[in-house]
Amino acid sequence: MVQKNAKKRVDKKAPSKEAPAKAAAIKAKHIAPQPARAFRAPVGRINRRFPESNSASRQFQLLLAGSMPLLRQKVHGAAYQVRSFFSTLALKIKTRQAGNDHRFIQSAVFIAASLLLTIFAANRVLYTTATTLSFEGRELGTVASEAEAQAAVKNVESSISQKLGSRYSLSPESLSYTTGVAYRGALVEEADLEEALSQSLRVVEHGYALYVNGDFIGATQTEGALDELMAQVATPYRNENTVSIDFVEEWEIRECDLPLEDFTNLADVALLLNSVKAGEQTYTVEAGDCWSVIAEDHNMTSQDLLRMNPGYDIDKLQIGDVLVTSQQVPYLTVRATQMEYYVADIPYEIEYVDDNTMWEGDTRIITKGAYGTADTVARVTYEGVDEVERVIESQTTITEPVTEVQARGTLERPSWAPTGSFRWPTSGSITSKYGYRNIFGGSSFHGGIDIANSYGTDIVAADGGVVCYAGWMSGYGYLVQIDHQNGYVTYYGHNSSLLVSVGDKVFKGQHIAEMGSTGRSTGNHCHFEVRVNGERTNPINLLP
C-alpha cells in the first residue's frame, strides 16, 4: 500500500509528456514578435522660437525636442514591449498562481508608470500654449502669445499710417485672439502674421509711381509700364537722325507702397503728360528785338502781349527785360538732339560806296548780292518744337556768294528825317479796330484805329516827316497829316487843338496835337490812320 500511494503522489506531480509541448506552443503564440511600425515624422514647419527657453525645465524640453526622432523610436519600442508584457502576463496568470509572483507585478507597475511619464514628456515637447489671430472671422496665423499677435497688429497699423500720411487703425470688432494648445510646428513668425494681415486689409499696394518736377503724376502696379510710357511720349520726336532724347523737366519713377486710390489707368497718365498746367513761360529781350516781332514769334498780337505784361512801354524795351509769353506750361517737354543734313545759304559780303547826296544811315543798292550754297551737317537741339541750339559740324561749299555793292549816305541826317518804323502816336485803349464796323445806325469801313484816353492827352508823330495838312476836315475834325517821304502818310484825327502847321518838319515822337472829340466822334480819342502810296493799311501791322 505504501509503495502504491507513493507512486500515486509521484504520478500526480509529474507532468505529462504532452504538457511541455503545449506550454511552448501557448507561449510562442502570445509573445511572437510583431512587425515594427514605420517611423513617420510629423508634418509641418518646426518653429525654432521657444519663448520659454530661459526656464531650466523648458531647456530640458528643448533637449528632448532635438532628440525627437530617437525619442519617437523609443516610444514605439516601449509600446511594443508593453503589448508583449501584457500578453505574457495573461499567459502566466492562466498557468501560475497570482500570489506566487509578486516581483512580476511590481515590474509591470514600474513599466506602466514609465510609459505614462514618457507620453506626458513627449506631449509637452510637441505642443504648447499659443494664440491664433483672426480677421473678420478668417484665421491668419498662430504665434506664441497674445502679446505677440497684438504687436503684429500695431506694426501693421503703424506701417499703413506712414504710407497713407494719416493715422490708421483697425476696428477692434474685426479682430479676435484665440488662446489654446497648439502644435509647435504650426506656429508662425510675427513677420509672417503681419504679412498675412496686410494682405487681408489691402489698404496699400506695392507699385511704381511717376513724379515730374516733384509732382505726383500717376502710379501702376506693373513693373516697367511707366518706363515704356515715357518712351512712347518721346517717340513722335524721334527719327533716324536722332542723337539723344530726354525731357527738360526732372522726372523719376519710384518703387514704393501707395494707397489703392493712387493707382491710375496708364491712358490717363499719358493724357496728363501731354497737357498743360498753370504757370508762366517767359522771354528775355535781346538786342534787335521789338515788341511786335516778339508777339508774332509767340503767336499773339501786340495787345495780347501787353495784357500779359502791363506797365511796359512798348517803345522802350530794354535788353534783359523778361516778358511773360504764356500763362500755361506743359507737364513734360521733350528735348531732342538730332543731326540735320541740308543745303545752307552762305551770306554774301556788302561793299559800301560813299554817296554825299544821301543822308547818313541811308543806303541804296548798286549791285545786288547773291547767297552762296553749301552742303551742311548740323547738330540741332529742340525743346518741344522750338529750336534752342544749332551747331554746324561741317560745310562743303557748292556755289560761292556774290558781293553786294551799296551806296551809303554821308549827309548829316536832320532830326525830322523818317526812320522807316512807327511808334504809337499816343497811349490809351483801342476802342475801334481797322475794318468794317456798325456805327450811327449803319455799317461802314473804318480806315484806321481809335485810341481812347482823356481830353488833352498828347498826340505825337509816329515817325519823322513833313506836315502836309493841319486843320479841319469834315468827319476827321481837327486833323494832322504827315508825309514821311517814303510813300507813307499818317493821319491823326479828332484833335482838340493842333500844335503844327503845313510845311513843318517834325521828328519821331514830337508833340503835334492834343486829344479831343471833334468831327464825327462819340468821345475823346485819336483816330490813327496809315496810307501807303495812297492806299489804307491796318496800322496794327506796322506798330510795335
Image: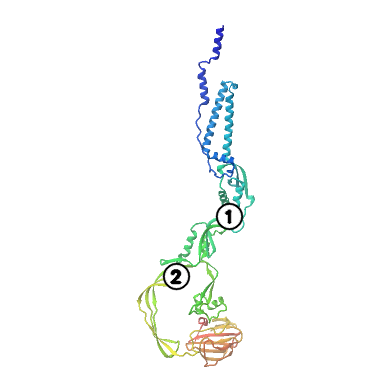
The secondary structure type at the circle numbered 2 is: strand
Measured from the top left, where is residue 348 in percent x and y?
Answer: 39, 80
**Numbered circle sitting on residue 159:** 1
The residue at which mark 2 appears reads as 381
**Dividing the picture into quarters, in which one does residue 361 lie?**
bottom left
Q: As shown in the figure, which amino acid type bears the numbered disc 2?
A: Thr
In the image, 514 versus 202, the foreground residue is 202
- Residue most extreme to the top: 1
Give the foreground label among 2 and 1. 1
Q: Residue at x 54, y 28 (%)?
A: 84
Residue 453 picture quarter: bottom right
Residue at 52 percent across and 22 percent down: it is: 26
Q: Residue furthest front?
A: 56
Spot the residue most to the right: 173
**Which x, y percent locates residue 128?**
59, 41
The N terminus appears in which quarter of the rendering? Answer: top right
- From the viewer's perspective, tell me whether residue 111 is left or right of residue 389: right
| Crowd class of label 1 (few under 14; some 14 to 19; many from 20; radius 10 Å) | some
What is the distance, in whole Å, between disc 2 and disc 1 at their CAs? 46 Å
